[in-house]
Every structure is written in structure tokens, then in C-alpha cells.
Amino acid sequence: MARTSSSKPATFKLSAPQAKRVSVVGNFNNWDTKSNLAKKDSRGNWMVKLNLKPGKYEYKFFVDGQWVNDPGCKSCVPNSFGSHNCTVEIR
């Protein structure tokens, strides 16, 4: 019998050529800014791939100590800090 609810790859990308450090942070990692560090390519694009179980997640990028929303995100929800978190749904 096939197993369901296995993890699926999710890719997070951000263009930030001047940034020194970028991580993707969300309710999938308890908002830990030190985990899930992105890697920078020669064009200044940062990327991290995560394996996430199916579900809806809230996230942001943490760029050089500042919270940044994903400019490519199509869905956001209000957070308790008066700003918004991006959302992604893994199916």
C-alpha cells in the first residue's frame, strides 16, 4: 500500500544581491532565524529547498537581521506584529 502525507520539496527564492545572509523562516521551523540558511548564486539570488509535509505554512525571509516578505508570494495573512506573513500550501 502506498504511503500518503510524505514530505514534498518546496523551493524558496529571493533576489537580494547586497545581502550577506538570508534564511527562510516560518511556522515549519518555529520561526528560527538561524535554521534554513539560503545559498546565494552569482547573480545575487538566494535559494533554499525544504522538504515539507502537505499543509499550509506561514513564512518570511530573514535578510541581514530584517524581516522581508517574499515578493513572489501571492497570498499573505496578517500577523500579531501588525504586518503580514506570506503563505504557501504544499499538496
Image (tube, rainbow, N blue to C red):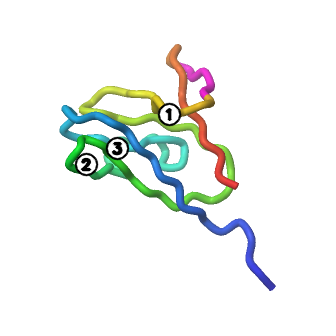
Q: Residue at x 43, y 41 (%)?
A: 25
Give the crowd class for mark 1: few <14, some 14-19, many >=20 residues within 10 Å. Answer: few
Residue at label 2?
A: 40
In the rendered image of this protein, does residue 54 appear above or below residue 30?
below
Q: CA–CA distance between discs 1 and 2?
A: 17 Å
Left or right, residue 48 beside residue 52: left
Q: Position of residue 14 (x, y in %)?
A: 37, 39
Residue at label 3?
A: 23
Left or right, residue 70 beside residue 2: left
Give the prevailing secondary structure in the magenta stretch.
Answer: strand
The amino acid type of the residue labelled 3 equals Ser
Label ID, residue 52: none
Q: Position of residue 38 (x, y in %)?
A: 32, 49
Q: Which one is nearer the viewer's eye here, 47 or 5?
A: 47
For the N terminus, the quadrant is: bottom right
Residue at label 1?
A: 72
Q: Circles 1 and 3: CB distance less than 8 Å?
A: no
Q: What range of the chain is rendered magenta?
A: 76-80
The amino acid type of the residue labelled 1 equals Gly
Q: Position of residue 89 (x, y in %)?
A: 65, 46
Q: Residue at x 32, y 45 (%)?
A: 46
Among numbered discs 1 and 3, the one appearing first in the sequence: 3
The amino acid type of the residue labelled 2 equals Lys
